[in-house]
Amino acid sequence: MTRVAIAGSGIVSAYGIGRNVLRAGLMSGRPAITPLTRFPLAFADRIKLNQVDPDLFPEGETGARAMILAAVDEALADAGLGREALADAALLVGTSGFLYLAEYEYRKTFAATGEPSSPPLRGAGRMADRIAAALGVTGPVLTLSTACASSANALLVGADLIRRGRVKRALVIGAEGLSAISLTGFESLMLLDPEGCRPFDAGRAGLQLGEGVAALLLEADRAGARLALAGGANRCDIHHVTSASPGGEAMAAVIGDALADAGLTAADIVAVKAHGTGSEDSDLAEAAALKRVFGARPPPFTAIKRYIGHTLGACGAMELTALVACVESGRLPPAAGFGTPDPALGIAPLTDFHPLGAGHTLLNFFGFGGNYAALVVRHD
Amino acid sequence: MTERRVYVHAAAALGPWGDTGADERRRLDADPPPLDLNALTRATLGAPLRQASHFVELAAIGARLCLDALGRRPPDAAAVYIGTGLAEVRRAAALFRQVMPPGPGLASPFDFINASNNMAAFYVAKGAGLAARNLTVKQEEFSFERALELADGDLRAGAVPAALVGGVDENVQPRSDHLRRITLRDDQWMGEGSAWLYLDGDPAGARAELVVIVEQVTAPDAPADAWAARLAPALAALKRAGEPWQLLPGFRLRATQREALRAALPGIGLREYLDHCGCYYSAAGFGMATLFDAAPPPGLSLHVNRDAGGRCVAVALRAL
């Protein structure tokens, strides 16, 4: 079967531009928590989040495009390729929908006129089309919007297109910006933890949102690549719109599907990058799922949303790129924000750096609307 | 290894009048009036969808009609794919009024939850008991075609046993508001709809075969006849000798391009489905699903659309 190599990756995160600063940040153990300065928000001083330095890119669509292209160019350079290599590649974007760009346009109009206006809610594919045009991509262009599993699903689709011979390369982008509506919406659901993300902690109380862009170049049978997408799966948990099946059955099922797709068993997994949002029921269900799949002692697992924020639709690509940085470092960072084990979970994430050698790592992504994805990554 | 083939077993389309079958289809001669789906939701689903949006109602009704037309329960591992241009545009607009200035700065939790683009796919999956692959493609151009392409690829690879594929979009009144999100000519009516195909790899009892999805990229400013001349051979190669065929032009296809393509495909008929559903991003699904309002027209049906960037996607279905 075709091996889907992760030939290159690039990222813009709250740590700055590039995988080097991300790696340095993760390996320092210090989360990139920042104040919110992009827009006014009544409760901004009561929450923690991870904002990309607004001086790095202009606001609005121009800046968003530049941010994406910065991540893409890093991924291409990482793979030793130029943009011309993307001519017949697929371009897949995973995002919750570029709401932040519509908000920016709305604020600009409101500032100029003092009047509310009809928001320019264009479809998410507009950005993908523009990026494809900028890169000269003539292969399939597709935008997936499946909540927090969006870019993980984009990675799965990209891998499928390569395995099935449709394309030789797939460029997968996860992109998300901080949005007043998202922050206010999660606040209205009482899902923002004032203490920030505390994954699997007994005192956890919700999310810590972030923003950023990551780009991964997948390629068929690339010699010498240290990482490969060995398998993965997507499923729908039809238990509830926003709550996971409490026993973790659906999460365990998608992990099981991913392992089967990779031709592996649970014993083959050396580490887990948990979804680990810090929300009460999602972490409870994920812990239950890990125990269902791995037994009472799962492999070492970490969660990184306190470091770079929960980047919603982008977290699949962002957190896979973070894993690339961990592989380069040979270490997994502790689950920042975790301090007190929760007896209800029965398991606890890493509290210190842990060696990461060759093997397979599982990455979990669980979104609203029961959209779940799991990826299995081989690293040498 | 023998390549798997993909067949259409059932289809359904809910149009902008609340129309669900051939006898209810009506030609649009203006933008359609606002569509209230409460009664149809209860009639089709047996109960209202509490707190669900208009977009979710559209999707859930259309999918249920398609499964009703199928007449049997799909396998548990059947996948759901939705293509949409704008998804939850009404709920998203409501959130702007609530959160952005001069609004109160508070978001309705229900509006926020419903504004997730994949919520319709969740309700469809829940309604049908399908806890398997579930993907929402949200993009302006070719959203239904891409969803169909994902399903086609998964079916041919044997990754899923069956697929429920929908094209769903809602409009926003008034037209001036809607035009901020979709560019329409003065002679194009804004539409909305929910159209679904049920696909699997079993030819027994199938109503059509999904033959192929063809994609080409040409220069955005390529003359219509040059564009048609380049596309036509790939489409003509699909036609069997003596077989009737018809063209379903997508809403981005300009009149000159449509006529150039007809000229390049001698003898091809024309099916102008947009007269009945109006123009919306995922309208291609309506065009394809309404082929099955009655016995599908014999022969080959080709849906062709093209975006402003010069990308063209054609879907070929053959009636069985």
Image (cartoon, coloured by chain):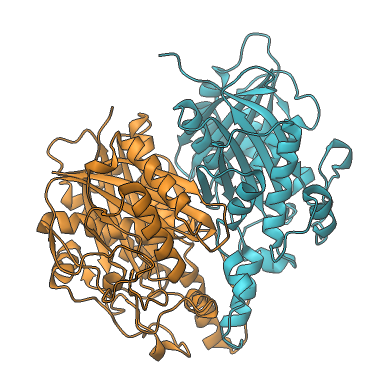
Chain colours: A orange, B cyan
Indicate whether A44 appears above or below B26. Answer: below
Position of residue A281 measured from the top left corner of the image (x, y, whole percent): 46, 67
Name the residue located 10 percent from the left edge and 59 percent from the top edge: A329
Residue extending furthest top?
Answer: B241
- Does A295 sit left or right of B231 as displayed? left
Position of residue A248 measured from the top left corner of the image (x, y, whole percent): 44, 55
Give the quadrant of the N terminus of chain B. top left
- Does A315 sit left or right of B28 as displayed? left
Q: Is residue A130 visible?
A: no
Total numbered badges shown on the rendered structure:
0
A326 or B16: nearer the viewer: A326
Position of residue B266 measured from the top left corner of the image (x, y, whole percent): 66, 19
Name the residue located 48 percent from the left edge and 46 percent from the top edge: A235
- Quadrant housing residue B22: top right
A339 or B71: nearer the viewer: A339
- Quadrant housing residue A38: bottom left
Give the quadrant of the C terminus of chain B. top right
Indicate whether B3 appears above or below A53. Answer: above
Indicate whether B246 appears above or below B224. Answer: above
- Does A163 sit left or right of B4 as displayed? left
Residue extending furthest right?
Answer: B23
Q: Is residue A162 visible?
A: yes
